[in-house]
Image: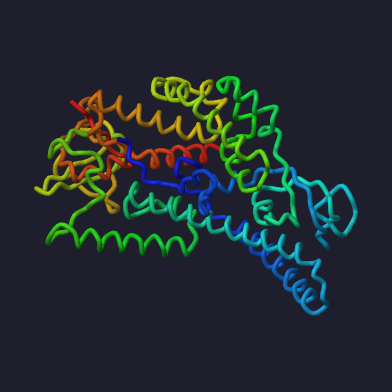
Amino acid sequence: MSDGQLPAFSEDGLRQVLQEMESLFEQNQADVNEAKVGGRADLIPSIKLRHCCLLRNQRCILAYLYDRLLRIRALRWEYGSVLPATVRFHMSAEELTWFSQYKKSLASFMRSVGGAEGLDITQDMKPPKSLYIQVRCLKDHGEFEIDDGTVVLLKKNSQVREQEERTASGEKTGSGHPDVRPFCPQHFLPRWKCEQLIRQGVLEHVLS
Amino acid sequence: MDTQSYLPVQPGVGMEENFLSLDDILLSQERLPARTECAFPRLGFLEKSTDNPDIVEGTKMELPLWLSKGLYDRKRRVLSVELPKVYREGWRTVFNADPNVVDLHKMGPYYYGLGSQMLHFDCPENTEIGQTLLQTFIGRFRRNMDSSQNAYNEDTSALVERLDTLEKALFRSGQSGLNSFQSWEKGQASQITASALVLNYRKRKITDMQQ
């Protein structure tokens, strides 16, 4: 999993480790009492060994939880603030809480920087060369409204359209519009609007 | 530059391990031949060859590194650790002769890591081990660096298979530097790309649905 993916949270694994730690601890407690009261100092190496095992389990659990948090943090930067359901399914309840708190911290930091409006530091991950960029639509994404009011329908193999009718969910209407043309599926859109969609694989940045 | 959002904890350098580093945890899982210098009552179940309820003094066992480090005491009453074959006299002369020939992945994938950790146990050959590790690394470094900086857009498995984990990590960072430079040369450095993470999730979802 070195590519940063988040696998499902292993509740079972964690529970087994915690159970093992409990039983090791109980055995050690019993041996410590016996060593102190019964004078059996020869039990001390065994106590030490069990203690090493406890420390090892603790280290493994902490590293597991910490690594998952690092992956979840990466999700905020790659996916944005709304995670798809498949990913959320892989997170435990505590991790979801952590994610929403991280989002809040990041948002309040971004608001505090850069004057009245704040600064979105999750934008412009690569140095921008122009305000508007050419994009090609790879997947159907429904409607997309730009600041000047024009509405663009993002659909594979479609042209730039205005004022399309919305369906209830805002998704594209069903099968083909009458004048869909399979060529020239490119749009010229403001950079800051598209960056998220490009990173999510909906649009493709076309260099001319 | 391909910006990485997932930054895992790096392995420690030299004799130090990083507590939260997954690589170091895997490294410390490697087994070492050891001999107990005292008895361990009630732990006989760990030693599968006898039915004794206790581990007797003088038993030879293979213990993982983390346990050996934890139990080892300078006064040597508890454990004495032997060097694995790869760090002994015989193999050391092979490494000194020609470091480039050796398959370090087979010699335990954590050759440098484990070797550095062996310095925790006061073996009499510590200085020689340190020397050999250093010389092997220096000897192999030039070739690894050249191959990582020049293998563009090709299958590198033949180059990488004889490298130890430390060298593999260096190779990977060399490759990523090379790829970034090439994409900059082509003028693609300012092209916003889909996040690799997102694409991987999509691919996995598709394969999951196909199963």
The structure residue drawn at horizontal position 66% and vertical position 47%, both measured from the top left corner, is: B122
Q: Quadrant of the C terminus of chain A?
A: top left
- In the image, residue A2 sits, relative to residue B149, either above or below, namely below
Q: Spot the residue most to the right.
A: B51
The structure residue drawn at horizontal position 23% and vertical position 49%, both measured from the top left corner, is: A166
Location of residue A27 in the rendering, given as x and y in whole percent from the top left corner:
75, 69
Q: Is A93 or B156 nearer to us in this picture?
A: B156
Location of residue B19 in the rendering, given as x and y in whole percent from the top left corner:
53, 54
Location of residue A141 in the rendering, given as x and y in whole percent from the top left corner:
29, 43
Question: In the picture provided, is B154 more to the left or to the right than B161?
Answer: left
Question: In the picture provided, is B12 more to the left or to the right than B127?
Answer: left
Query: What sort of colour scheme is used for the picture?
Result: rainbow
- In the image, residue B13 sits, relative to residue A57, either above or below, namely above
Q: How many marks?
A: 0
Quarter residue B178 falls in: top left
Location of residue B93 in the rendering, given as x and y in whole percent from the top left corner:
65, 25
- In the image, residue B175 sits, relative to residue A97, either above or below, namely above
